[in-house]
Amino acid sequence: MRPARKTLRRPDELVAAGLIPGERRGEIEAVAARYALALTADVAELIDPADPRDPMARQFVPAAAELDARPEEMADPIGDGAHSPLEGIVHRYPDRVLLKPVHVCAAYCRFCFRREVVGRARALSRAQLDAAVAYIRSHREIWEVILTGGDPLVLSPRRLGQVVETLAAIDHVKVIRVHTRVPVVAPTRVTVALVRALRAPGKATYVVLHANHARELTSAARAACARLVDAGIPMLSQTVLLRGVNDEAAVLGELMRALVECRVKPYYLHHGDLAPGTAQWRTGIDEGQTLMRALHGRLSGLCQPTYVLDIPGGYGKSPIGPSYLACIGGANGTARYEVEDFNGRRHAYPPAPLETSDRASSL
Ligand SMILES: *Cc1c(COP(=O)(O)O)cnc(C)c1O
Ligand code: SF4
């Protein structure tokens, strides 16, 4: 008989599934008491319990070290709180907002940057959701609404459809973007009905997939992405740089290629955020830059994400290199540069032409 495709939520279920040894159950119970725990059947099937360095286990199976917070880590590492005018909304940049209708995910990444909130805070009530939508409606500068959480694709197609329809009815909202891990961790949730719920006539829907390793792109996950893209929904990806998961050029490159093969354009490679208990996954920024250099020029331009850091304190995301351009003198529009190619060789680039006398005299 085929085993039931059940989501594992309790430490004893992880022991029974052979994902943690029985003697570690006590310590894992302490972790589970503090942080949300769920492994869908799709995730559990991806894990090789015989491999102590399995990159899937490292992302989804809890470990005692998650309770060791470091002094530089913080509960709200990207400063959502500083830009939240009301429950469920984060408005950091003028033209776009995050709308977080739910705080649960289908499966929980152990390194989650919102780990103090996801799986713990309550979903928005009807009244809170109405207030959040009213905020978006009254701020005409909001051009894009980013549904995140939690994972908005855990909502039923009916509820998701209501949210999308309500947003689409707001004139100045032109783009609805959904950040999700569901096509990887619960691909069968991406039904025809769910895909239909994401679309709104006259508005653009984008889906951004969170994926960290090529092995996550199983045939079921690829089929889920294909259902979205075939329906006319462009897909992008975001990857978290994680030690022991994807901090090798070959592994990262294989992921980016697999995404492009699925018609998913790599968008961001996130430097690990300072969430409590996540030091075991965090690399140095120099290591991230070295990886980006390894991808540059050796993989198609389609496979290149932008490496970004969400600046602690709520200042937003910035690209953190590497930079291939060095200024070697001059200023005021006549600066001279050296540009580095993908083999590390440097090439001089001439300064801009001097202003013509016509233009100078017209000043
Ligand atoms: C990441 C983020 C966005 C989206 O940023 P993009 O660079 O447009 O992908 C928007 N708002 C907040 C608060 C964010 O954290
Ligand atoms: S899918 Fe995103 S929000 Fe959910 S647990 Fe993973 S990192 Fe956190």
Image (cartoon, rainbow, N blue to C red):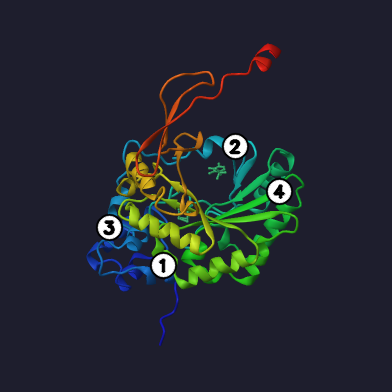
- Label 2: how many residues lie within 10 Å, few (<14), some (14-19) or many (20+)? few
Q: Amino acid at mark 1?
A: Val
Q: Amino acid at mark 2?
A: Tyr
Q: Check contact, mark 4 vs mark 2: CB within 8 A.
A: no
Q: Amino acid at mark 4?
A: Lys
Between 4 and 359, the one lying in front of the other is: 359
For the residues labelled 1 and 2, the Cα–Cα distance comes to 34 Å
Number of the front mark, 3 or 2:
2
- Label 4: how many residues lie within 10 Å, few (<14), some (14-19) or many (20+)? some
**Whether residue 108 is visible:** no
For the residues labelled 4 and 2, the Cα–Cα distance comes to 16 Å
Number of the front mark, 1 or 3:
1
Residue 27 circle label = 3
Label 2, on which residue?
Answer: 93
Number of the front mark, 3 or 4:
4
Q: Amino acid at mark 3?
A: Glu
For the residues labelled 3 and 4, the Cα–Cα distance comes to 48 Å
In-image side of 353 versus 293 (left or right): right
Label 4, on which residue?
Answer: 174
Q: Check contact, mark 3 vs mark 4: CB within 8 A.
A: no
Residue under the point 38% across and 65% down: 10
Q: Position of residue 216 (x, y in %)?
A: 42, 64
* SS for dot 3: helix
Residue labelled 4 has its Cβ within 8 Å of some atom of ligand 1: no
Residue labelled 2 has its Cβ within 8 Å of some atom of ligand 1: yes
Residue under the point 33% across and 46% down: 282
Residue 312 circle label = none
Residue 339 sits in quarter = top left
